[in-house]
């Protein structure tokens, strides 16, 4: 598949056209950023590890009946995906209180949230991704009430699959962020990525972070943390990590 012109360059990924208008190529770069891009670095191999984990998780979700944009992985740091019109929402599912939930509300870090809590932010760095509610999402015309209910239901199904999978690797899935988009015929698919940049993962035996919090809060060697996750995921599927 040919790498055509760049369509979009985000903070950590670039999107390229291919010969097929319905298919795009996602490049996972080695850039890492935090706090709306105020902190940034380049870390060798980071793109490859996030691409491999993302591809593995999209395949796992597809096998469990969740429709995603994932098509294939042409090499270790690229994914071929279905072209989507992205919905400007960050859908966050939280199993355990951490991060902004603890900073903004009177939750104690580590409190189990049962049932899991869904938080939806408006994806706009210039507005610092403000939190929305159902009425605002509908008033803004971003989703219909039916599509909103479907996206929430999909997010909870994604959570069940990922939580069980990470538990089998000795990792607690604290929370994660996903994004959705529409195909030209209006079908809503899970898009973007699911990686150590977009999940909060805690090692069950040590309690240590194995995700971007290591970078955000200078908790140690972020690549060592990302490698730990990728190694455990790759042990499940050698094909995706060749
Ligand atoms: P928090 O709201 O606690 O900062 O983030 C909740 C979860 O969503 C974390 O797993 C975090 O990594 C993810 N998340 C929230 N906003 C973003 C974002 O803009 N980009 C990425 N990659 N992940 C995000």
Image (cartoon, rainbow, N blue to C red):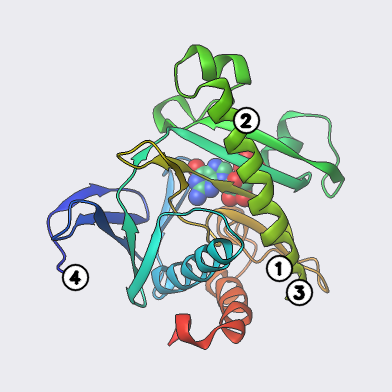
Between disc 4 and disc 2, whose residue precedes? 4
State the residue position of label 1: 166
| Residue pointed to by mark 4 | 1
Indicate the position of residue 217 as horizontal and vertical percent values. Answer: 61, 54
Say if 221 sits above or below 108 in the image: below
Q: Position of residue 7 (x, y in %)?
A: 20, 48
Question: From the image, which quarter does the N terminus lie in?
Answer: bottom left
Looking at the image, do the residues carrying marks 3 and 4 touch, with CB atoms under 8 Å apart? no
The label nearer to you, 2 versus 3, is 2
- Give the residue displayed 72% in from the left and 36% down from the top: 101
Residue at x 62%, y 68% (from the top left corner) = 220
Secondary structure found at label 3: helix
Residue with the mark numbered 3: 168
Residue named by callout 2 = 149
Precedes in sequence: disc 1 or disc 2: 2
Tell me if mark 1 has few (under 14), some (14-19) or many (20+) residues whose alpha carbon lies within 10 angstroms of its own: some
Secondary structure, mark 4, is: loop
Compared with 137, 182 (above or below) is below
Instruction: Say which label, 4 or 1, has the lower sequence index.
Output: 4
Residue 164 against residue 177 in the figure, above or below: below
Find out whether the residues at labels 1 and 3 contact each other: C-beta distance under 8 Å: yes
Task: Tell me the distance, in whole angstroms, between the alpha carbons under discs 3 and 4.
Answer: 35 Å
Q: Where residue 39 appears, x then y in whole percent?
A: 45, 49
Disc with the residue nearer the chain's start (2 vs 3)? 2
- Mark 4 nearby-residue class (10 Å; few <14, some 14–19, many ≥20): few
What is the number of the mark on residue 213? none
Q: Residues within 10 Å of mark 3 (few under 14, many from 20)?
A: few
Q: Residue at 49%, 24% (x, y): give it.
A: 143
């Amino acid at each position: 598949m040919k790498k055509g012109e760049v369509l979009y360059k985000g903070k950590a990924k670039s999107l390229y056209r291919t010969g097929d208008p319905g298919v795009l190529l996602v490049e996972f770069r080695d850039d890492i950023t935090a706090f709306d891009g105020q902190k940034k670095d380049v870390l060798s191999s980071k793109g490859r590890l996030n691409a491999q984990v993302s591809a593995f998780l999209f395949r796992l979700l597809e096998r469990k009946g969740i429709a995603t944009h994932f098509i294939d992985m042409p090499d270790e740091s690229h994914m071929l995906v279905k072209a989507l019109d992205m919905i400007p929402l960050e859908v966050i599912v939280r199993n355990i209180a951490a991060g902004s939930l603890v900073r903004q509300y009177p939750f104690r870090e580590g409190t189990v949230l049962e049932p899991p809590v869904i938080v939806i932010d408006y994806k706009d760095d210039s507005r610092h991704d403000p939190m929305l509610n159902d009425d605002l999402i509908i008033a803004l015309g971003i989703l219909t009430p039916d599509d909103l209910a479907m996206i929430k239901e999909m997010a909870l199904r994604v959570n069940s699959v990922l939580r069980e999978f990470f538990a089998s690797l000795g990792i607690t899935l604290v929370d994660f962020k996903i994004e959705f988009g529409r195909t030209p015929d209006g079908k809503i698919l899970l898009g973007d990525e699911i990686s150590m940049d977009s999940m909060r993962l805690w090692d069950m035996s040590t309690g240590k972070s194995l995700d971007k919090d290591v970078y955000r809060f200078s908790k140690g060697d972020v690549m060592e943390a990302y490698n730990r996750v990728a190694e455990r995921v790759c042990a499940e599927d050698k094909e995706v990590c060749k």
